[in-house]
Image (cartoon, grey):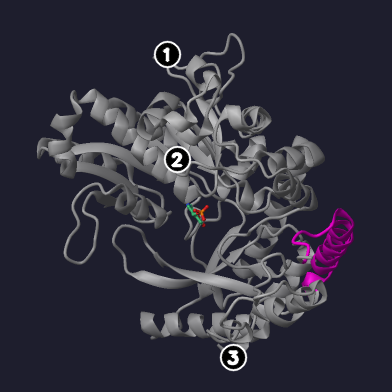
């Protein structure tokens, strides 16, 4: 008799309960672990055989390898002492949502392939849009009587996997729109190498990557994408609006076709806020698609006192932020809205015979496959739905406010220590700071001391920070090395931030 292939339901229950216990133990104890692992490239792979198992293995052996193989190579992003990059939030409600999504195992590519997957996502994205203060024109079901886009456009929200994908989707939608506007597709195809897009020199690298993937514009011998024009920033690292307007007008005069602008609300380097109220009218008047990337900072807008960051959002064509960064929803969950769903669908819809169905053809249902890059999609809305229902708006506001409070404390401590300086204005919970230049020290020496300090902090395993370079002074000032203290871990409390500061200031004695 052949060996049974599947686990029995009984075995699954036992293993599943054990796995939940393991996760709960891990998360409750993660604080005590060294934040980053001490392995070299290849160490983990060396513990795995070169060939797959010919016969199914015993679950005892599989589970033992979690501790033996996996854990030595894990960076503990869920540690309250993880302050690198931006956080990767997680929570028990979100984990349960992900588990349920795996259990249901649906592919919600179209309404017809699982109506609940689509309709829950649509409703939850409308909730979330309202929570961050988006105009109703971005929502799938705007409230009756609300002033919706004057031009008859229809909006809506969708969950993408990442902010990078949201930017790419916005880019191709913008291209579809400009193609429609400029007459026949053929005519524009000839000119396509003339398309130009804009972002500040502080925008995330995913903007250039989107251009590479979309294949727009020319590429220089050095691989630089000339179709992406980088606009200088002011001393606060936000895009200079006048320079954007001039760049667009000059390019137009030279026969180029400017079509797309990415504004960043909360840049990766320093969480600088590009001014939508200034950039928006520039884009509107010139008919450029404005995409707003608020990957980390968007979550702060759940609190009315932080919504100033989105002042002018009514001028944007699309907006996205990552609940997987700072809104307690496990990776991956990038929330994206557009005011112009028709352009997104125009760019991405393809309807092969094998996917045709009456619901799609009726036009009464949303098919999210036409709003994203892949065809298939799992039911990510479940985890977002669970998070919103478990914490409620007030719970999430309290979460954001507490991190804002402790980030303020950290900034005060840095400012009070004359060996350090704060290197960028703090808009949310990221503090960019560095050791001050010593009298007579050249800039490279200051950078080297700061690099060494970062290395020393991370080598302790008691905290993990990352770095960036910033053009301190704005414009085309030289790039200087700064440490980034990104607060926002799901378990991070004041005591962790206090301990991190005491570690940093102690190590600075030798830096
Ligand atoms: N945009 C900004 C401003 C970011 O900070 C990041 C990542 O930190 C991204 C985009 C990319 O995010 P994702 O990994 O979701 O593509």
Q: In this view, does 438 lie to the left or right of 405?
A: left
Observer-side mark, 2 or 3, equals 2
Given contact means CB atoms under 8 Å apart, are the residues at marks 2 and 3 in contact? no
Q: Which quadrant of the rendered structure holds the C terminus?
A: bottom right
Observer-side mark, 1 or 2, equals 1
How many residues crowd around disc 1 within 10 Å: few (fewer than 14), some, or many (20 or more)?
Answer: few
Furthest toward the left, the residue is: 254
Q: What element carries label 2?
A: strand
- Residue indicated by mark 2: 292
The answer to whether residue 132 is magenta is no
Q: Is mark 1 on a helix, strand or loop?
A: loop
Residue 444 location (% of width, % of height): 37, 82
Instruction: Decide: is 433 above or below 226.
Output: below
User: What residue lies at 15% left-to-right and 31% top-to-bottom?
Assistant: 186
User: What residue lies at 54% left-to-right and 16% top-to-bottom?
Assistant: 364
Furthest toward the front, the residue is: 1
Q: In this view, does 394 lie to the left or right of 88?
A: right
- Residue indicated by mark 3: 510
Q: Is residue 96 left or right of residue 244?
A: right
Identify which residue, 189 or 505, lies in the foreground.
189
- Residue indicated by mark 1: 152
Which circle marks residue 305 in the picture? none
Q: Which of marks 1 and 2 is nearer the N terminus?
A: 1
Q: Earlier in the sequence, mark 3 or mark 1?
A: 1
């Amino acid at each position: 008799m052949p060996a049974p292939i599947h686990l029995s339901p009984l075995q699954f229950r036992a293993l599943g309960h054990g796995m939940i216990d393991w996760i709960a133990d891990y998360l409750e104890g993660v604080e005590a672990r060294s934040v980053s692992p001490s392995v070299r490239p290849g160490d983990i792979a060396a513990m795995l055989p070169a060939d797959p198992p010919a016969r199914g293995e015993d679950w005892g052996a599989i589970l033992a390898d979690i501790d033996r193989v996996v854990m030595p190579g894990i960076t503990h992003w869920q540690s309250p002492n993880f302050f690198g990059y931006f956080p990767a939030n997680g929570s028990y409600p979100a984990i349960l949502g992900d588990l349920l999504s795996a259990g249901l195992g649906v592919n919600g590519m179209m309404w017809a392939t699982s109506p609940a997957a689509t309709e829950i996502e649509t409703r939850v994205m409308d909730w979330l849009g309202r929570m961050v203060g988006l105009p109703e024109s971005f929502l799938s079901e705007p409230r009756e009587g609300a002033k919706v886009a004057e031009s008859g456009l229809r909006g809506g929200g969708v969950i993408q996997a990442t902010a990078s994908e949201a930017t790419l989707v916005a880019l191709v939608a913008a291209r579809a729109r400009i193609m429609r506007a400029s007459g026949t597709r053929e005519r524009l195809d000839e000119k396509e190498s003339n398309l130009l897009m804009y972002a500040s020199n502080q925008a995330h690298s995913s903007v250039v990557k989107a251009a590479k993937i979309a294949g727009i514009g020319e590429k220089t011998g050095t691989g630089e994408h000339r179709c992406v024009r980088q606009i200088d920033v002011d001393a606060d690292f936000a895009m200079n609006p006048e320079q954007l307007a001039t760049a667009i007008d000059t390019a137009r005069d030279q026969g180029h076709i400017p079509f797309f602008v990415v504004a960043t609300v909360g840049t990766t380097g320093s969480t600088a806020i590009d001014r939508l109220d200034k950039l928006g009218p520039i884009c509107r008047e010139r008919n450029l698609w404005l995409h707003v990337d608020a990957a980390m900072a968007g979550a702060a807008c759940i609190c009315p006192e932080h919504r100033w960051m989105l002042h002018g959002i009514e001028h944007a064509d699309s907006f996205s932020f990552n609940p997987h960064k700072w809104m307690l929803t496990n990776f991956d969950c990038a929330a994206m809205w557009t005011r112009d769903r028709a352009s997104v669908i125009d760019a991405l819809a393809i309807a092969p015979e094998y996917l045709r169905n009456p619901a799609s053809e009726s036009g009464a249902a949303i098919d999210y496959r036409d709003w994203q890059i892949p065809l298939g999609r799992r039911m990510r809305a479940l985890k977002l739905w669970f998070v919103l229902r478990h914490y409620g708006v007030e719970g999430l506001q309290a979460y954001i406010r507490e991190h804002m409070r402790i980030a303020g404390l950290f900034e005060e401590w840095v400012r009070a220590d004359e060996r350090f300086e704060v290197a960028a204005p703090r808009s949310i919970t990221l503090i960019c700071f560095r050791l001050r230049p010593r009298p007579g020290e050249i800039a490279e020496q200051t950078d080297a001391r700061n690099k060494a300090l970062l290395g020393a902090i991370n080598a302790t395993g008691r905290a993990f920070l990352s770095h960036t370079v910033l053009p301190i002074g704005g414009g085309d000032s030289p790039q200087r090395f700064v440490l980034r203290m990104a607060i926002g871990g799901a378990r991070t409390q004041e005591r962790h931030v206090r301990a991190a500061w005491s570690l940093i200031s102690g190590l600075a004695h030798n830096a």
